[in-house]
Image (cartoon, rainbow, N blue to C red):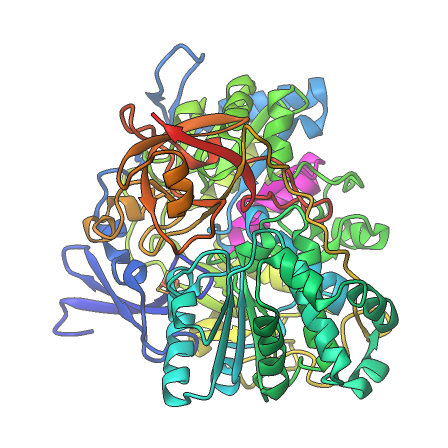
């Protein structure tokens, strides 16, 4: 408290999975401003451009949804109604659809920006009481390949490292990621560490020369889709030179012989040709790994968003397992989480194939445990529709109703023409959000206004398993409600009220913690009071653990979460199964983020300072591809895939490989006739195991317009 005019609160940034600590100052007029929290162990007072401007998104209420709205048919405009009217009608339609078509005709599509409590109650409602597993999340679009990769190798979806390993590492293997723009505060720690220790080596693997690649000691600008060829051949070089940890392999892993056979199936020359790299550069990467004391790999969407995303993860984690570089200071495979609470959503099992506390939906014992815990209906053994499947099911009539919470699929999902068809074909669409800037709102039959960041109490888990409490600082505007309150009221109208009779979010969190008892992610020692006192804790944190701040690093005893406690090395085939290029569509389109925008820009797009960086969509192409097509810098061109076409400005640059083009993923709105939405072009191929889409490889053509 400062002269009774300002109150300070500690919280966490609501954008990316870095999870930086923020200090919010509330002024008497109800406005807030945000600074970095110097005491937060993840970020130590630093914030990137998005975090520094976070308060604008709270202070500017001009786009906020203020009242429930509803329309009685698709030809009518949305009209303001009371909460009871909106939820009574929603409950009546859900009941009617469930009665006529069964519970799998309805579903929830949620978000890595939902809090742990929100994820928990929605998951409990649909799986434990409605009786369907149709809940999936936009985290499916970013982290699900890493989740499966961790489970298949380490036995659990578990990030083994902590951020403090950055300062203990001396070889960074950054692949399929641009943390300088997308995880800036983690990258600042890497930069500062390199500056203080010039011998630290940074290897960046990316078809684009990004801001991250520009700072690399070694940039491997490989051909898109050849990541596994590269990691496998590095594995071969490590084995050939005896740069592996044979004791670790023998005592703590299975699968090495099959791996060895797989990686020896290609020569270095073959691999270098496929990847489009110099043999000497690949040898140097292996040498850097060998010579380091701390080998930290970092990756995100470039590996995950692939039709072979799980295999890409496995082949990378293999490098840590054959060298024994895991569970030790400064060493380990570190997936950089995209969203602020993607990890919390996985903890509560808020995906179509999961149950609370990382339990497996296909495991009958796990289903029985959860069913007994919730005391609801029998949990179905049929996995629900995943993100892209949900909208395909709406399009072809297998699903009739969808409830979309805190996400904007009409920009973020692949093949937006298919998504639009799904939303138009659905009998009933509910959109629960904070902003009328979401492109999905216009497809809604019912719009439910929700409280935003800093307007409700909640908990997030960041990339390093760090759980942080987020306080309520200001009231939500108009009649907007906490998302958990909306779900509770709906559950009551559906007749499940007794099981959703929580007095506050603290009670929901307590129930979630109890559900983790005895699991690998046990957090039974936590509650709101402890989180408020300690500020943040890394899971696991059991009820025996009354001191400290949780578990910094996993697998320090080399015992893994598999049944036999041994990690599994996988022999991974290196073929890419992406869309085939053709004469009509000869270029590879890859998509990604830009520095100052977040997701579909519903929040960052209203901050002038952030729009000053890059305000318009564009396509980046190589000079030779531009020359072949007679295209000049800044020209508006047509870009087309088999699914749709856009008009967009060209940026010609040698930073991208010939034959590849790049578009930022954020843009959705059709702006006049000149620009179009990126994901109209992308394809719906998904990884067979993770169901994560192949955003990084769509076949397109570019021509003058
Ligand atoms: Fe927020 Fe991520 Fe920036 Fe940190 S790095 S301030 S969490 S957007």
Q: Quadrant of residue 310?
A: bottom right
Q: In the displayed structure, would residue 82 be above or below residue 281?
A: above
Residues 197 and 508: in front is 197
Q: Position of residue 520 (x, y in %)?
A: 71, 69
Is 175 on the left or on the right of 635, as rendered?
right
Q: Is residue 90 visible?
A: no
Quadrant containing ligand 1: bottom left
Q: Residue furthest top?
A: 75
* Residue 441 belongs to the span the image colors magenta: no
Q: Position of residue 288 (x, y in %)?
A: 58, 82
Q: Position of residue 560 (x, y in %)?
A: 76, 75
Q: Quadrant of residue 507?
A: bottom right
Q: How many marks?
A: 0
Q: Position of residue 471 (x, y in %)?
A: 37, 62
Q: Is residue 45 visible?
A: yes
Q: Which residues are magenta?
A: 116-139
Taking the spot 74% from the left edge, 83% from the top edge, the residue there is 241
Residues 370 and 401: in front is 401
Residues 668 and 97: in front is 668
Q: Quadrant of residue 14?
A: bottom left
Is 323 on the left or on the right of 672, as rendered?
right
Is 226 on the left or on the right of 548, as rendered?
right
State whether the magenta stretch is mostly helix, strand or loop: helix
Q: In the displayed structure, would residue 345 be above or below residue 481?
A: below
- Image quarter hosting the C terminus: top left
* Residue 118 belongs to the span the image colors magenta: yes
Q: In the displayed structure, would residue 503 be above or below residue 230?
A: above
- Image quarter hosting the N terminus: bottom left
Taking the spot 45% from the left edge, 22% from the top edge, the residue there is 445
């Amino acid at each position: 408290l400062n002269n009774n005019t300002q109150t300070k609160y500690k919280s966490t940034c609501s954008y990316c999975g870095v999870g930086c600590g923020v200090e919010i100052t509330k002024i008497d007029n109800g406005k807030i401003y945000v600074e970095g929290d110097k005491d937060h162990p993840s970020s130590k007072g630093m914030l990137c451009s998005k975090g520094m401007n976070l308060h604008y998104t709270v202070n500017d209420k001009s786009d906020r949804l203020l009242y429930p709205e509803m329309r009685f048919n698709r030809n009518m405009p949305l009209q303001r109604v009371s909460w009871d009217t909106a939820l009574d009608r929603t409950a009546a339609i859900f009941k009617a659809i469930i009665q006529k078509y069964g519970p799998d005709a309805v579903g929830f599509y949620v978000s890595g920006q939902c809090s742990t409590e929100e994820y928990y109650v929605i998951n409990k409602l649909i799986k434990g009481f409605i009786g369907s597993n149709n809940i999936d999340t936009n985290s499916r679009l970013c982290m699900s390949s890493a989740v499966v990769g961790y489970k298949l190798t380490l036995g659990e979806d578990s990030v083994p490292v902590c951020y403090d390993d950055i300062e203990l590492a001396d070889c960074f293997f950054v692949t399929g990621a641009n943390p300088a723009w997308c995880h800036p505060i983690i990258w600042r720690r890497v930069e500062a560490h390199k500056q203080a220790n010039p011998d630290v080596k940074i290897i960046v693997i990316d078809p684009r020369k990004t801001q991250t690649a520009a700072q690399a000691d070694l940039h491997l600008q490989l051909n898109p889709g050849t990541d596994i060829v590269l990691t496998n051949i590095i594995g071969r070089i490590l084995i050939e030179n005896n740069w592996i940890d044979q004791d670790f392999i023998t005592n703590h892993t299975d699968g090495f012989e099959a791996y060895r056979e797989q990686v020896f199936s290609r020569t270095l020359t073959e691999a270098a040709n496929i990847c489009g790299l110099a043999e000497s550069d690949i040898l140097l990467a292996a040498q850097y790994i060998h010579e380091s004391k701390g080998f930290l790999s970092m990756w995100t969407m470039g590996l995950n968003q692939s039709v072979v995303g799980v295999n890409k993860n496995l082949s990378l984690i293999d490098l840590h397992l054959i060298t024994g570089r895991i569970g030790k200071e400064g060493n380990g495979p570190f997936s950089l989480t995209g969203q602020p609470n993607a990890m919390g959503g996985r903890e509560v099992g808020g995906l179509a194939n999961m149950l609370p506390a990382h339990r497996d939906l296909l495991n009958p014992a796990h289903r029985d445990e959860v069913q007994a815990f919730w005391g609801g209906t029998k949990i179905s053994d049929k996995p629900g529709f995943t993100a892209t499947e949900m909208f395909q099911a709406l399009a072809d009539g297998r699903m009739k109703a969808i409830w979309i919470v805190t996400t904007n699929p009409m920009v973020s999902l692949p093949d937006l023409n298919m998504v639009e068809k799904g939303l138009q074909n659905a009998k009933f669409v509910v959109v629960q959000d904070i902003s009328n800037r979401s492109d999905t709102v216009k497809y809604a039959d019912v719009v439910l206004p929700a409280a935003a960041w800093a307007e409700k109490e909640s908990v997030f888990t960041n990339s390093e398993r760090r759980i942080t409490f987020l306080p309520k600082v200001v009231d939500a505007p108009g009649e907007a409600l906490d998302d958990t309150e909306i779900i509770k009221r709906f559950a009551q109208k559906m007749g499940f009220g007794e099981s959703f009779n929580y007095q506050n979010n603290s009670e929901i969190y307590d129930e979630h913690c109890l559900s983790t008892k005895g699991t690998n992610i046990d957090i039974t020692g936590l509650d709101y009071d402890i989180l408020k006192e300690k500020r943040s804790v890394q899971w696991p944190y059991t009820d025996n653990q009354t001191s400290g701040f949780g578990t910094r690093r996993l697998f320090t005893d080399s015992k893994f979460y598999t049944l036999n406690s041994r990690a599994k090395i996988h022999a991974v085939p290196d073929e890419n199964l992406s869309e085939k290029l053709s004469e009509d569509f000869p270029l590879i389109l890859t998509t990604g983020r830009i520095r100052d925008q977040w997701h579909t820009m519903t929040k960052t797009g209203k901050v002038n300072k952030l729009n000053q960086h890059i305000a318009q969509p564009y396509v980046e192409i190589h000079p030779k591809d531009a020359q072949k097509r007679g295209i000049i810098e800044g020209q508006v061109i047509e870009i087309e895939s088999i699914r749709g076409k856009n008009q967009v400005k060209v940026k010609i640059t040698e930073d991208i490989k010939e034959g590849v083009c790049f578009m930022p993923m954020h843009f959705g709105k059709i702006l006049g006739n000149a620009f179009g939405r990126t994901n109209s072009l992308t394809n719906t191929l998904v990884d067979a195991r993770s169901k994560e889409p192949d955003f990084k490889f769509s076949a397109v053509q570019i021509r003058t317009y």
